[in-house]
Amino acid sequence: MAFGVAAGSRRDIWNVAMVIPLQGPAGLFGPSCEAITELAAHEINAEGGILGREVRVEVLDGGAAPQAIAGELRDLIDRGRVDAVSGWHISSVRNALAPVLADRVPYVYSSLYEGGERRPGIFCSGETPRMQVAPALRWLRDNLGARRWFVVGDDYVWPHVSTAAVRQFAHELDLDIAGEAFVGLGAGDMTRLVRRVEATPCDGVLMLLVGHDAVEFNREFARRGLHERLLRFSPLMEENMLLASGHSATGNLFVSAAYFRSLVSADALDLLGRYVGLHGPSAPALNNAAESCYEGLHTLASLTRRAGTADLPELNAAIDGVAYHGPRGTVEFHGQQASQHVHLAIADGYDFDVITRL
């Protein structure tokens, strides 16, 4: 799928490959990612595009096998059909794409992730555990007395590296890690995982599960009544996941993120209004994962504007200090990593009640 411009010569168009999941456990993010990407491209084009060139978006399925995505992207770049890459996708996909994109086109990785990305040409606009998880654990300790945690996650790089960071946070915050368990991405059946949590004395569960895996965990967790005595905290939980989990499965569930649809700020409300204005009231639920795609495109626009060129060496030199204002408030890059405000919310039915800024 492509959108942005109907026609035009190659030199008048700036092609962005948006890698977003259309299948697999994160596939439920796909429709909202596509919808908000269309809005971002429309806004950037209304302001003159990227260096005077109209933005044209081509969606690639980020839910496919990582090496298959990398091969498809390599072919598009070889044929001159991609000028930049962005989108929400898991870290396994990022690691497959990085060598394909190296020294060729800029890559704004918009998803929250485990942190530590330093390869040239990769600019990370999402949250990291130090800004997103550590302050939430501190708040939950101070306000709810949660000190003993069981970590559950999918078996790939983001949950594993994030869990290593959580161990460090536990040392800093005087917390205990009561247990850790991982399941295959897309495994589906969470019975054994929930049984391990049930058998372990703890105050809460830190969930590092993606999309439908988290949904299945929530359902089994509630089916066993664990939501009545244990809290859950996740840095990756959005409105579509709440809806899929069901109202009865989201009690005592806390989430931290830089953006929530229910965030009461002029910028967030304005984005929601423009989104509904473009797609109508039946548009896919706006959420953190989707909104990150909006941030990715606007990061590309701000970075190229500052550098005055789309050439990768100049973009690498210009990224430090890039800042812009949007739905998340002020986003500013320190090196290749964006810094932004993060909020803590509690699930309230099929939406989130934002409690505090961390």
Image (spheres, rainbow, N blue to C red):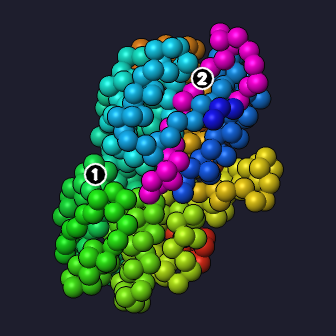
Query: Horizontal placement of 221 versus 291: left or right?
Result: left
Residue visible at 27% across and 56% down? 155
Residue 156 image label: 1
Residue visible at 60% across and 73% down? 350
Please indicate, yes or no, whether residue 342 appears anywhere in the rendered image: no
Q: Look at the numbered discs 1 and 2 and tell me whether their residues touch, using CB distance below 8 Å.
A: no
Residue 53 is one of the magenta-drawn residues: no
Query: Horizontal placement of 50 versus 62: left or right?
Result: right
- In this rendering, the answer to whether 198 lies above or below 279 is below
Please indicate, yes or no, whether residue 225 appears anywhere in the rendered image: yes
Residue visible at 43% across and 49% down? 112
Please name whichever residue, 295 or 282, is drawn nearer the observer in this view of the structure.
Answer: 282
Give the extent of the magenta segment. 4-27
At mark 2, the secondary structure is strand
Residue visible at 40% across and 64% down? 213
Residue 31 image label: none
Dot 1 crowding, Cα within 10 Å, few <14, some 14–19, many 20+: some
Residue 356 image offset from top left, x and y in percent: 52, 67
Quarter holding the C terminus is: bottom left
Q: Quadrant of residue 143?
A: bottom left
Residue 335 image offset from top left, x and y in percent: 38, 31
Query: Horizontal placement of 280 versus 291: left or right?
Result: right
Name the residue carrying label 2. 15
- In this rendering, the answer to whether 62 lies above or below 301 is below
Please name whichever residue, 70 or 315, is drawn nearer the observer in this view of the structure.
Answer: 70
Q: Quadrant of residue 98?
A: top left
Residue 207 image offset from top left, x and y in percent: 35, 67
